[in-house]
Amino acid sequence: MTVSWVMTYDSLTKSVLQYLERSDPATREAIPTFITLTEFEIAQEIKTLGQMQVVQSQMVVGNPVLQKPARWRKTVSMSVAVDNIWQPMLLRKYEYLKAYNPAETNGVPKYYGDYDAEHWYVSPAPIEPYPFEVIYYERLQPLSSTNQTNWLTQNAPNAMLFGTLLQAVMFLKDDQRQIFQQKYSEAIQALKAEDNLRIADRSSIAVDS
């Protein structure tokens, strides 16, 4: 039986030290920062891969404020179930949500929007404890000594390796920057191509349906 290799936080750290041919304490201590910066860089470049999640919960009668999931990044869609039939809700600005229901009476929520970084706001406020479903993009669980893997280590180890090395050589003022930059750029371009394909596929499905 063949077991596929999966990068981990520890193996990434070891590989970085081997590539740099460094083992001094200062470099070791800085590697977690290099890894974190690389995760942020990739998240800015790639919008959807490994980040789409679906969550279901239940509204509270009379409460228009809904809690966002941990590491929420961007909402894709929200639906509400009325008599076991799922209905899509429409995205609107907070000012529209307040103006749509100025008397703040309860009903079937038709619209939703961002209330703040941790909450959504629906209008009108739910008259019943309706089930709702949200599709959203999340920020990946950051790598650490206690979280050894995530989507990036499992699916984009080359981007993580060369991105981390690029951060390291900039810090160390090493002359290998150009080599690592090329390898990192190639890995990112491959991820972008896959990302754009998924976006196009999702758009086609939305139009057809």
Image (cartoon, grey):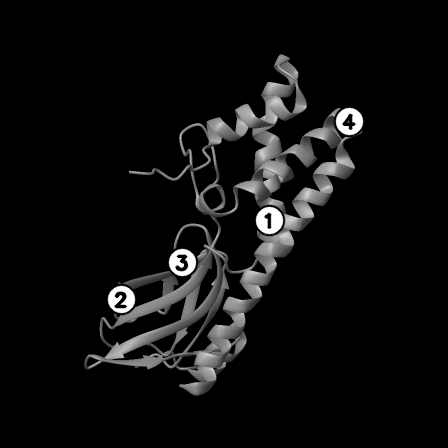
Q: Secondary structure at mark 1?
A: helix
Give residue 174's mark.
4
* First along the sequence among labels 4 and 3: 3
Disc 4 and disc 2 in contact, CB within 8 angstroms: no
Q: Nearer the viewer, mark 4 or mark 2?
A: 4
Q: Nearer the viewer, mark 3 or mark 1?
A: 1
Disc 3 and disc 1 in contact, CB within 8 angstroms: no
The C terminus lies in quadrant: bottom left
Residue displayed at 60% across by 55% down: 190
Residue at the disc numbered 1: 42
Residue at the disc numbered 2: 60
Residue displayed at 40% across by 58% down: 68
The relative height of residue 30 versus residue 200 in the rendered view (above or below) is above
The N terminus lies in quadrant: top left
* First along the sequence among labels 4 and 2: 2
Count the labels in the image.
4
Mark 3–mark 1 distance (CA, rounded to whole Å)? 23 Å
* First along the sequence among labels 4 and 1: 1
